[in-house]
Amino acid sequence: MKNIELLVLDMAGTTINEDNVVYKTLMHAVNDYGYNVSLEKVLSSCAGKEKLEAINSLLQEIGGDTNEALPIFENFSDQLKEAYQNLEVKPIEGVEDFLLKMRAKDKKIVLNTGYTTEIAQQLLDKLGWKENVYYDALITANDVSESRPSPEMIHLAMQKFNINEPEKVLKAGDSVIDIEEGKNAGCGLTIAVLSGAQKRTELESSNPDYIFNTISEAEEVI
């Protein structure tokens, strides 16, 4: 059993089920520019990354025009706002109980994401998750200069709660980028979950400490 004091949890696919709407929207936004990328390609290439960066690297991979990255990103952002207004979002099964239990044991919960603060807050509002009830802080791509897999978001979370030893931190996510972020920060535990974007074979490539169906299964190792 590790002495974990801080849990840094990814949002979409890890704590929140939004039916891959982000990656579906990203696929449509790219294909509006005359491309023909599949959802599977978008999931394997873009999961967990800051979204402008994700579009840029996707265009490089498919031999597209990277000058189109910014207009595609703006198209994506507009479409996503609209998609979110009509979307039903749900917590992933068992997650709300898990968050409440962890906080009852005096563990800090930070939600972190490659989304903008505006999008992340929209998701939390839809769920009715209040700060200091379900989580202690939200850290998004807007709060840092380097996006995942840089450990900057985790370092910021540690600073917020005066935790100096990364081995007291657990990082969980549904993409390889999440696990790489945790390893780059030196986290005591990295946990991959199968409730989101990437499959077991992809997640195994990043060597997480555990692969669980959902984050609530992590209770047994904390």
Image: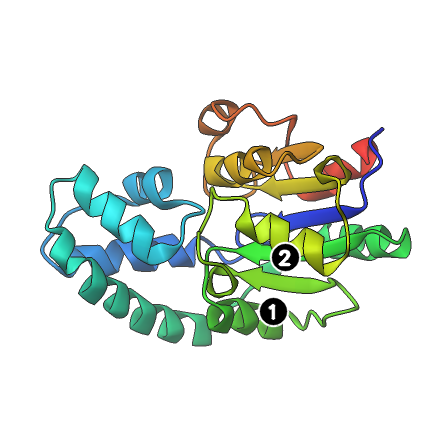
Please, is residue 217 above or below residue 160 in the view? above
Q: Which residue corresponds to mark 1?
A: 124
The three-letter code of the residue at mark 1 reads Leu
Circle 2 or circle 1, nearest the eye:
2
List x then y, in percent, for residue 3.
85, 36
The three-letter code of the residue at mark 2 reads Leu
Q: Is mark 1 on a helix, strand or loop?
A: helix
**Mark 1: few/some/many CA within 10 Å (<14, 14-19, 20+):** some
- Residue at (33, 40) in percent of width and height: 45
Please, is residue 208 above or below residue 89 in the view? above
Relative placement, left or right, of 52 versus 161 is left
- Residue at (72, 41) in percent of width and height: 169
List x then y, in percent, for residue 15.
62, 52
Q: Which residue corresponds to mark 2?
A: 111
- Residue at (37, 75) in percent of width and height: 82
Q: What element carries label 2?
A: strand
List x then y, in percent, for residue 89.
55, 64
User: Are the two marked residues, 2 and 1, in contact with CB atoms closer than 8 angstroms?
Assistant: yes
Q: Distance between the residues labelled 2 and 1?
A: 10 Å
Total numbered labels: 2
Relative placement, left or right, of 54 versus 183 is left
The quarter of the rendered structure image containing the C terminus is: top right
Query: Can I make out residue 37 in this image?
Result: no
Answer with the quarter of the image where residue 139 lies: bottom right
Please tell me which residue lies in front, 147 or 85.
147
What is the basis of the colouring in this image? rainbow
Please tell me which residue lies in front, 6 or 221.
6
Relative placement, left or right, of 88 versus 30 is right
Please tell me which residue lies in front, 53 or 184.
184
Q: Tell me which label, 2 or 1, sits earlier in the chain.
A: 2
**Mark 2: few/some/many CA within 10 Å (<14, 14-19, 20+):** many
